[in-house]
Image: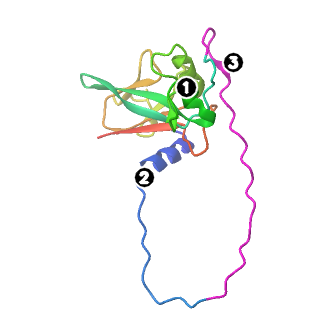
Amino acid sequence: MRAGHKAVVAGLLLTPLALGSCGGDTPTPTAPRTPVVVASPTPAPSPTPAKSALPPGMVCGEPTPPPMLRMNVKIHGLEGSRIVFDSKPVVPNTNGYCDKAGFGDWKFCDTRPEGHPDRVACDYLVAGVSPATKRWGPTWYFNDTPCGSNPTDCAHHPSEQFMTIGKSKGTYVACAAETTPVAAGGSRCGVYELK
């Protein structure tokens, strides 16, 4: 797993710690300081995914999904000792996107409702192409190692890049392509901890 992905995964897995203050002597009052005002730069808007990048014949119609907020990862099903994991990109409700896509005024949503004819194309648009398999969908990792490196732990799904096959307990991570835009405060990865 790339260093950037490790930092994202570490940030997703850490539990915040509550910090308390220590008692002590009462501080001596000082004269108030004049605050220094520093202008923060206006962030550049994130680009939306490029529709022209989709496979021939696939269309993600209007509205175009905004940059991804995160990747959701869940267990799709069990097949004997194998666990099939599934993932899907989630996007923020930028400019009323969720309502326009058919979800209502939600804070975030899928790219399209389940069963919508544009769903697959819109998911492709937001997730990009995995450099590991050259298929549309996220790149999968198991305990910081690309899935497929050791098929006894994690193997590529034979037909669906949004899925992977897990065989061991540990941390499964699905990350969208580095070339796809991510919303402010978002992450291109999703994590599932199998205990």
Mark nearest the camera among 2 and 1 is 2
The residue singled out by tag 3 in the image is: 52
4 shown above or below 83: below
Q: Quick check: can you spot residue 28? A: yes
Mark nearest the camera among 3 and 2 is 3
User: Any magenta on residue 45?
Assistant: yes
Q: Residues within 10 Å of mark 1 (few under 14, many from 20)?
A: some
Judging depth in this view, the residue of 112 and 128 nearest the camera is 112
Which label sits on residue 155? none
Q: Amino acid at mark 1?
A: Ser
Tell me the SS state at disc 3: helix
What residue range appears in magenta? 30-59
In this rendering, would 110 be left or right of 126? left
Residue plotted at (40% across, 54% down) = 15
Q: Amino acid at mark 3?
A: Ser
The residue singled out by tag 1 in the image is: 130
On the image, the x and y values in percent for residue 38 come to: 74, 64
Judging depth in this view, the residue of 34 and 138 nearest the camera is 34
Mark nearest the camera among 1 and 3 is 3
In this rendering, would 81 be left or right of 98? left
Residue 23, by quadrant, is bottom left
Tell me the SS state at disc 1: loop
On the image, the x and y values in percent for residue 54 come to: 63, 17
Find the distance from the CA under tag 2 to the CA under tag 1. 26 Å
Q: Residue furthest top?
A: 57
The residue singled out by tag 2 in the image is: 14
Find the distance from the CA under tag 1 to the CA under tag 3. 17 Å
Judging depth in this view, the residue of 138 and 48 nearest the camera is 48
